[in-house]
Image (cartoon, coloured by chain):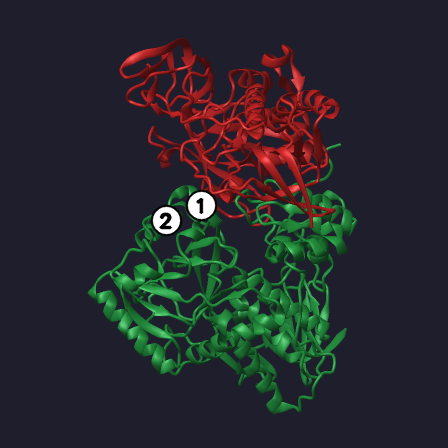
Amino acid sequence: MQNYDVIIVGGGAVGCAVAYTLSQYDLKVALLERNGDVAMGTSGKNSAVVHAGFNNRPGSLMAHLCVDGNQHFAEICHRLDVPYRACGKLVVGFDDQDMEILRGLVETGRQNGCRGLELIDQAEMQRLEPGMGGVGAMFSKSTAITNPFLYTIHLCEAAMLGGVECFMNQEVCKIEPQPNGFAVLTQTETYRCKTLINAAGLYSDKVAAMAGDDRFCIYPCRGEYLILDQHASTMISRPIYPAPHKGVGGLGVHLTTTMSGNVLIGPNAEYIDDKNDYATKPAVLEQLFAEAQQLCPQLTRNLIIGQYTGIRSKLVAKGEKNFGDFIIEESDRVPGLINLIGIESPGLTASLPIARMVADIIGRKQELRPNGQFQAEYRGPVRFREQSREAQDALIAQNPDYGEIVCRCESVTKAEIVQALHNPLGAHSIVSIKNRLRATMGRCQGGYCTPKIVNLMMEELGVAPQEIDFRHSGDMPFPGRVK
Amino acid sequence: MKEIVCDVAVIGGGPAGMAAALSAAAEGAQVLLIERNEGLGGILNQCIHDGFGIHRFGELLTGPEYAGRFAQQVAAAEGIQVLSHALVTEVGADHTVFCTTPKGMLTCHAKAIVLAVGCYERTRGAITIAGTRPAGVYTAGTAQHLINLDNVAIGKRAVILGSGDIGLIMARRLTLEGVEVVCVLEKMPICNGLPRNVQQCLKDFGIPLYLNRTVTELRGRNHLEQVVVCDVDDRGATIPETTETIDCDTLILSVGLIPETELLRSAGLPVARMTNSTPVNSHLETEVAGIFACGNGLHVNDLVDNVSAEGECAGKWAARYAAGERAGSAIPVECGTNVRYTMPQTLLPGETARLSLRVLREAREQTLVVRGDGDILFSRKLSHVTPAQMVCVELPGIVGINSGKVEVSVE
């Protein structure tokens, strides 16, 4: 049995932010993740927007932590080598009623302490985003975009270098109370801890119940997205949202630019029963494109290169009028259990302030001494495509593998793939490589580089084809050799 | 960073690029042939079936054999320097070519450039099949690479969507490797592959081909378990009553090829809707003087013989451009009845030209007609035309058109 001060259940943005934050202190910390990698749930399946905080109810934790997270996001991205762009965002109105809603947003934003909100007329909107539909807009200067995969992965890898132990493919199936703590059981292992952090996202209700606190119910709410080719980035240069209408369960179908230049369309909002149902639906994908064309009439279908689905962890059921704020607290029924429940949007933006609150809760119960091993800064593999030609030439001189481009659409080199395979967390599936480096994410969707990546994985990891994972452990994309 | 100069830089060492390099060198040009892989041949290296070279060599060759004949000539030719393991990331309108190689970044200043960059396959995402994102979904070419070149197996029971030639060939290939191919589905009312492939790859193996039928959804959380299929009407709308599910662990997509346009775009060239590539004149010169294009990067061909012919044309004129020869203004070709596109899109007056076109609809006993100022300038009988089969004709030189344009029809 392995003993820890703190066990974090869940390797999403929030769990990894908690791991990173706690690695500042002299605590023995473990993180358990049920998938083969971090950022495999909602953290990797969203709009990748760093929200400003004007959509959230004044006085709520959501509002307070979102504004706080937004104001420090650039700094943490800088420290952890995570892509970030302060591009702002437009919320577009199509009629007088929408413009009234936008005035309301500005007021909400003011109450929440957001900076840089202004209403702009059609001419100014057209100047910022030529070709956009709508009669006017609210411009939010402090909204930004990031790469949520690298954000989560780099938080986790920095935490690991700081001494946090991370265990993948460890789904918690039982939690037993122990004197002064918990025994956390997975299919294969038992871990013991004093403090248990429940950062299990969609499954945070189940984890709380396993630990003895059965008051919560997470309602999964699915959102589907279409991914557009990077050519679409010539059409818009920042996220474009419609004025939000009450009761839709999300912020409305929007267009979002991404760090890579792809444009996302989505998400819709549909309450579902199965927390693992990531399938897209034909009618929804049709509807998404139609709604996106309203916002941006110049969009054409041949720009579509992919699709994905994310699932929101909602605390409010379909049709309920209640407001579901983040729950960030030590359970009053189960001492030592810190619940992070209902962390939906803006959870990514708020993840570090949430982690800070967790540290404060622990700090009230025990003295937190600094950890000498803490890694405040982290750098992932150098992103070749972002370098100048001179810098690229210098990289190749150091390591000729930089001169070998494996993924042509995204200019990902062999050197980067080899590093990703051997980094602190490692990458054990084709999707893990994709999430770290963007290889297979381009317009040919891995048509060119999949065989090259498979060969590199076999070489570097010393495995047979049937031992390679696609997304999940054991999903076996290749049954073996042909002959 | 290394810099080099040459007369003609040919980008891409597949069939189009090798032919272009050879014809440019035959004109006396100093040629740099740039290839991203280790060896020449491009996609032909994974096409281990036969059927290549009927027109050019009068015999049935495998892909590697066809490529090998050109590669030998390239090795023997004077004036061709092959730069392999080099990926071109950008081409400037000033004829600068930027390459990434394991020996460092390299900049080539060329007098003329031939883009012979090939195409990529349309994916599941591009045709928006809904459902999960499981393991076991491959484009036909990727599956072909994994099986033929990497010795990696991809599944046990496959459905193939799309009746393009690679899909048909993979139906046979998978069957020969012990994979059960349940069926081939084609959303269109006609087969997209060559008739000979339908016979040799499907009928000879008893694999059914269903037209007007497509995959609408993928099922399976981790690995593909089922595809949902259904008929489509003549407008392409699905007919829900015809829905059924097929158990399979592999879906192969052969749903179209799209020319690579990154380098065209970097040189500031426009990309037209019909060919998904850039317009050219009858020298295969693009709208940027001295930049030529050929092969599947210019428009998707069905026969490699035509690709080689285009490469030869582009290489020859690129060499002459490098030697100082300039083309004059060209006559636009408009698409008339039942013509989806023509390539080239403009004709140089007084010069013979090789005109390729695709029709919109299948038809029998047709005539290809070229008109200018209302007069018939050229006509050719065509016994059977289908959208899947490209039509190629040699046009005589055209002069003295007052309206400044010609129209091509198949009627």
Q: Which mark is residue B262?
A: none
Name the amino acid, label 2: Phe
Looking at marks 2 and 1 on the same chain, the residue that comes earlier in the sequence is marked by 2
Residue B109, relative to residue B23: is it above or below? below
Q: Which mark is residue A304?
A: 1
Name the colour assigned to chain B in the rendering.
Answer: red
Q: What residue is rendered at 55% in x and 20% in y?
A: B306
Between B357 and A246, the residue placed more toward the observer is B357
Name the colour assigned to chain A in the rendering.
Answer: green
Secondary structure category for the residue under label 1: strand
- Marks 2,1: beta carbons within 8 A: yes
Q: Relative to A39, is B338 on the left or the right? A: left
Q: What residue is rendered at 57% in x and 62% in y?
A: A149
Mark 2 — residue? A289
Where residue B116 sits in the image (x, y, percent)?
A: 58, 32
Between A163 and A1, the residue placed more toward the observer is A163
Secondary structure category for the residue under label 2: helix
Residue B357, relative to residue A350: is it above or below? above
Q: Residues within 10 Å of mark 2 (few under 14, many from 20)?
A: some
Marks 2 and 1, how far apart at CA: 9 Å
Where residue A242 sits in the image (x, y, percent)?
A: 32, 61
Give the quadrant of residue A448. Answer: top right
